[in-house]
Image: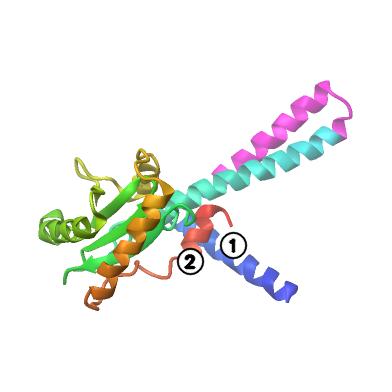
Amino acid sequence: TRKESSAASDVYKRQTYKMAHQFDPVLPWWLLGSFLVGLAVGVVLGLFLDPFWMWIILGIFFGATLAMLVFVRRVKAATYKKFEGQPGSAEVALGMLNKKKWVINPAIAANRQMDSIHRILGRQGLILIAEGDPSRLKQLLRTEVRRHEQVAYGVKVITIQMGRDEGQVPLDKLADHINALPKVLSDSQVAEVKKRLTAIDTMRKRMPVPKGPMNLKGAHRAMRGR
């Protein structure tokens, strides 16, 4: 029912706030400050433009909207901070990608230490994302690149190593980094490569691989502002 849905939404919002506050202690002050900034804009405009009360209402609305935008941004940063370093944490960033533009296959391969390889496909190309210790992943990544190139037929496989060392992409920058890559494939090429990748996936041995540090549905919703 609508009442139950509203109650569930309120619980979710409280949980999201508690999680964000845990990793961002100054969150309440950011929210209060952003609201007051919006309200102050309304008050200032009301001093010069009539009617005054209308600008106060608009200031409250603007302040609430600004506070919500700040909240979403701070929750996103807190979520990355919470999951960074956990096996499968790359799925947090991959979950932020537009699923209409990307075919996302998290943890297509992994080793016993739970280092893993993720795969995404879109106009920017066929991309393998390595998460974990680079030295342990070296052979696994090389194998996956060769395997994908055999069925991609001329489509270059792009590799990204997630991490904070030189030449790596940190978790909180991963989604933006991927979206900023130049587009090299047409829609028809993406569809064709997607079809060919099915052969790899059907032949792949079933093995336990990390599917994210936890159920990330709530984290994804929070980071999208829903």
Q: Which mark is residue 13?
A: 1
Q: Secondary structure at mark 2?
A: helix
Q: Looking at the rendering, which quadrant does residue 202 occupy?
A: bottom left
Which quarter of the figure is the C terminus placed in? bottom right
Identify residue for label 2.
217
Task: Report the residue at 24% width, 61% height from top.
Answer: 117
Measured from the top left, where is residue 170 in percent x and y?
30, 47
The answer to whether 30 appears left or right of 133 in the picture is right
Q: Amino acid at mark 1?
A: Lys
Decide: few, some or many residues near mark 1? Use Cα within 10 Å; few <14, some 14-19, many ≥20: some
Q: CA distance from mark 2 to mark 1?
A: 13 Å
- Taking depth in this image into account, of 174 and 81 the one nearest to the observer is 174
Which quarter of the figure is the N terminus placed in? bottom right
> Where 66 falls versus 87 (above or below)?
above
In magenta segment, residue 98: no
Q: Looking at the rendering, which quadrant does residue 141 occupy?
A: bottom left
In magenta segment, residue 39: yes
Q: Amino acid at mark 2?
A: Lys
> Where 29 falls versus 110 (above or below)?
above
> Where 189 falls versus 198 (above or below)?
above
User: Mostly what secondary structure, the magenta segment?
Assistant: helix
For the residues carrying marks 2 and 1, which lies nearer the camera in this image?
2
Q: Secondary structure at mark 1?
A: helix
- Where are the magenta residues, as a range? 30-53
Which of pointers 2 and 1 lies earlier in the amino acid sequence?
Answer: 1
Measured from the top left, where is residue 94 in percent x and y?
39, 56
Q: Is residue 82 visible?
A: no
Task: Report the residue at 20% width, 64% height from top.
Answer: 115
